[in-house]
Amino acid sequence: MYYFDMEILKQKLIIHYANKEYPHQEWTWDSKNQPPEDLVLWLIKEGQADIHIEGQAKISIKRGSCLFLDLSKRHYAMQNPKKMLNSVAIRFKCSASKKPFLSLRQHSSLPHFSFMEQLMNSCIEAHWEENTAIATHWLKSALLQYNKVSKIFAGKKIDLNIHEVIDTICKRIDQNPEHPWSGAALAKQLNFSADHFIRLFKAQINQTPNEYIVNNRIMAAQSLLLRTSLSIQEIAKTLGYSDPYYFSKQFKKISGKSPRHYRQFHTNE
């Protein structure tokens, strides 16, 4: 196990804020009133913004940007009102020194980020439910994953040809979660055996192709449950499920709640 991994695992983390962000059109963010000892893990799912960090050049962030911010420096962000942000963010502090965390990259562009998003969402939902131990477990998992993937996508230890192929596949799945994708069909398109394709895909994404496909459908369903008034049957149909019961069963397996309870829980916050 790497030094960073051991340091993160032994730290006591205190989460101050964890949420899924859907800001209004005029949204800006200024860190000046937030505790300078805090750290922020922030993943951009959609949209575009500029962030100014004290003493540094401006960073433009967009879909796939992941940031790790040290609030001892002032940060100011403003989104593009024509490309509004959809993101997840966790602000926390460590009870001891935050020095071990400062080796994390401040900003990385992740071509696909479904697994990272799942880890952060699990932390957020445990925090909402006031389950501190589980929330910090998922936060540590997200930090370890960010440390790993930020190095990979900085160009280390990766076969660029297969990386680009899998990246393209992931983007297609992200953009069309309702399509009847399958790992076997994708492998056949690439003239790979199913087993070989699964190994390559999992080495890069940390999930099998079929897990990635299902998780994307469920994340799309979560968004539709919170942002539309569509019925559960309509959402199931929109995402390519012919059987609403099977959709609900798969949703509960991944989200921990039925679609109905998921909508009620987040609507009543």
Image: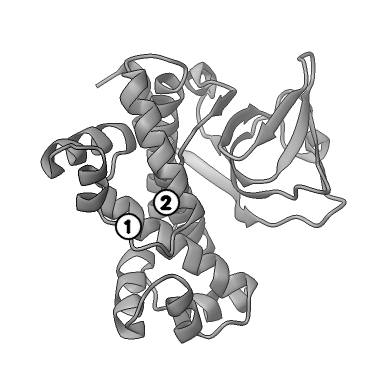
Q: Callout 2: few (<14), some (14-19), or many (20+) C-alpha neighbours within 10 Å?
A: many
- Is residue 118 placed above or below 263 in the rendered structure? above
What secondary structure is marked by label 1? loop
Query: Quadrant of residue 193 in the image?
Result: top left
Question: Mark 2 highlights which residue?
Answer: 173
Looking at the rendered image, the quarter that the C terminus falls into is: bottom right
Give residue 98's position: percent from left, percent from top: 54, 24
At a point 46% along the width and 43% down the height, the residue shown is 171
Residue 153 placement (x, y as % from top left): 45, 23
The numbered disc on residue 181 is 1
How far apart marks 2 and 1 lie (CA) works out to 8 Å
Asked if the residue under mark 1 is in contact with the one under mark 2, i.e. CB atoms within 8 Å, the reply is: yes
| 206 to the left or right of 236 | left
The residue at the point 47 percent across, 17 percent down is 154
Q: Amino acid at mark 1?
A: Trp
Residue 238 image offset from top left, x and y in percent: 48, 74
The tag on residue 262 is none
Q: Is residue 54 visible?
A: yes
Sooner in the amino-acid sequence: mark 2 or mark 1: 2
Asked if residue 266 lies left or right of residue 209, the reply is right
- Residue 32: x and y in percent read 82, 34
How many marks the image carries: the answer is 2
- What amino acid is labelled 2 in the image? Ile
